[in-house]
Amino acid sequence: APCSRPWQPLRSCSCTCPTLAAKMIHTILSEGLDTKVVVAVAIVAGSVILKLVLDSLRRSPVFIVPDAYREFPLVEKENINHNTRRFRFALPDSNRPLGLGVGKHITLCADIDGSPVMRPYTPTTTERDLGFFDIVAKIYPQGKMTQHLDHMKIGDKIKVKGPKGRFEYRANMKRHIGMISGGTGITPLMQVAQEILHEPEDKTKISLLFANWTEDDILLKGWLDETEKKHPDQFKVYHVLNNPPENWKQGQGFISEQHIRQNFPAPADDVLICICGPPPMVKAMVGHLEKIGFTKDMIFKF
């Protein structure tokens, strides 16, 4: 089995992969095959084994645990728009991912005014991003955690535990996934979309309804636009704004039953609707979906 000790760094891993590769090459040589054939087979075998080892490492929950906080230093801050920042935190090993899993979130904790403040966040990075994780957050004037994040200096540490969440994703588990997001609720949905679109064999279609107050409030708009252009047959986005600019060509007001009917597939066992946003919005969306005919097992609320 590849990498029998996945918690160790790759350089000190004592898994049996190298031994298996050596035995394979020895067997081929003993058969008297042509040297070119031997080299070609060795390269292919080595590549397969290396992929298995790396995949095993990347699947391992390395740096976070669900029942205890661990600290990570802030190494980078970026302004996304007028009220949104990206915060990058470093991991102890630059060759490992956070170990979160698709559709899962973490809990951030900070001591603010003498009391612990805890908030859930979904990193926008994936298990293919090694050595760091990113949190994208809107900075609210009265938001204790977002104000704390915004005032952090490079080198300051944040407490993190996880992973948490009930969502489990498998490639091609559904024919079509509809996503409804409000504001920062886009982050767990983005995480699932990234996983689907990264795997060529995953043919799941994605339709996203994204609600915001203004065009400037659309979180991760650059990524959404680029991804829609790159995957035009698999990823569709429809924006709904409360205060749209002039000549706005998509939705206005709040996401309605009509918006859902126009952009999502009809209810079916191979269709799943995922929702993430403020509680009043989630409640309203569930009402629309049930009226259309979606059952409880066709709806997932992050």
Image (cartoon, rainbow, N blue to C red):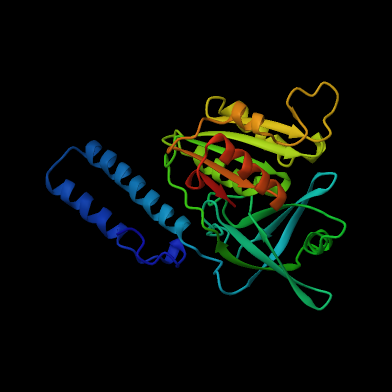
> Residue 238, relative to residue 38: is it above or below?
above
Q: Quadrant of residue 147?
A: bottom right
Residue located 79% across and 59% down the image: 146
Q: Residue at x 67, y 44 (%)?
A: 284
Viewer-side residue, 49 vs 24: 49
Q: Which of the two residues, 207 or 147, is positioned nearer the viewer here?
A: 207
Of all residues, the one furthest to the bottom in this rendering is: 114
Q: Is residue 208 left or right of residue 240?
A: left
Residue 235, image x and y in percent? 57, 31
Measuring from the top left, give residue 234's x and y in whole percent. 53, 29
Image point (39%, 55%), residue name: 53
Question: Residue 206's spot in the image, x, y percent?
Answer: 54, 34
Furthest residue in direction front, as rendered: 291
What is the quadrant of residue 215 in the picture?
A: top right
Is 84 left or right of 298, judged from the image as shown?
right
Tell me residue 116's x, y (percent): 74, 74
Farthest-out residue, left: 31
Q: Does 220 appear above or below 60? A: above
182 over 165 or under it: above or below: above
To which quarter of the image does residue 100 belong? Answer: bottom right
| Nearer to us in this view, 78 or 40 | 78
Frontmost residue, 120 versus 294: 294
